[in-house]
Image (spheres, rainbow, N blue to C red):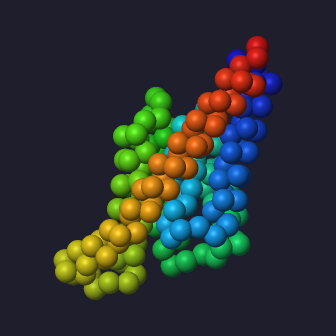
Amino acid sequence: MSNTYLTKRQIVIIAFLLVAVLLRLIPHLPNFTPVTAIALFGGLYFTRKSWAYLAPLFIMVISDLFIGFHSISISVYAAFLLVSFIGTQTKKPSVFTIFLSSISFFIITNFGVWLIGYPKTWTGFVECYTLAIPFFRNSLLGDFFYSGAMILGFNYVQNKYLNLA
């Protein structure tokens, strides 16, 4: 691989991430967002591990400047880093990888919700996760939709335009 290929490839990856974040800013169904897909995509396709974590995280912080930070933002970013890690450890994307990313994001972010908004009891914990289940459906649908679109779109662009050497 030449340096030009890597540079073009990284630019295309960043462009995909930016488009996904822009989609996060427009009106959408509750929890039907590209958030998990952004983290997974960055982990899957950046060859430099630091970029795999920092670029998607930086892009999310920028979009949160417009949307607003919330009391669970730290949990969201922690989940984001774990999903990026899942992407860096995956040889190729799969339905399992997307599902694992979705479950991980759900568990971590709702743990944050439990910490700040529910009694610190077993009953409070169960109530928090039980009440979150209806929101998980849209999250899961969004994760599969956006991950699929980003992965298939990037593979198409990579095969059509970046493998010209």
Nearest the viewer among 51 and 19 is 19
Furthest residue toward right: 4
**Looking at the image, is 65 positioned above or below residue 95?**
below
Quarter-wise, where is residue 126 in the image? bottom left
| Residue 113 percent across, percent down from the top left | 39, 76
Viewer-closest of 74 and 45: 45
From the top left corner, tell me how far across and down residue 154 is, in percent. 64, 35
In the rendered structure, the answer to whether residue 69 lies left or right of residue 101 reads right
- 75 or 148: which is nearer to us? 148
Q: Residue 64: percent from the left, percent from the top? A: 65, 69
Q: Relative to 164, does residue 68 appear above or below in the rendering?
A: below
Residue 39 seen in this snapshot: no
Whether residue 127 is visible here, answered yes or no, is: yes
90 to 128, vertically: above or below: above
Above or below, comparing residue 160 to residue 127 in the picture: above
Residue placed furthest toward the top: 165
For residue 118, which quarter of the picture?
A: bottom left
Foreground residue, 143 or 76? 143
Q: Look at 70% across and 64% down and name the residue there.
A: 62
Which residue appears farthest toward the left when viewing the image?
122
Horizontally, residue 76 falls left or right of residue 149, namely: left
Image quarter in which the C terminus is found: top right
Residue drawn at x 43%, y 36% as measured from the top left: 94
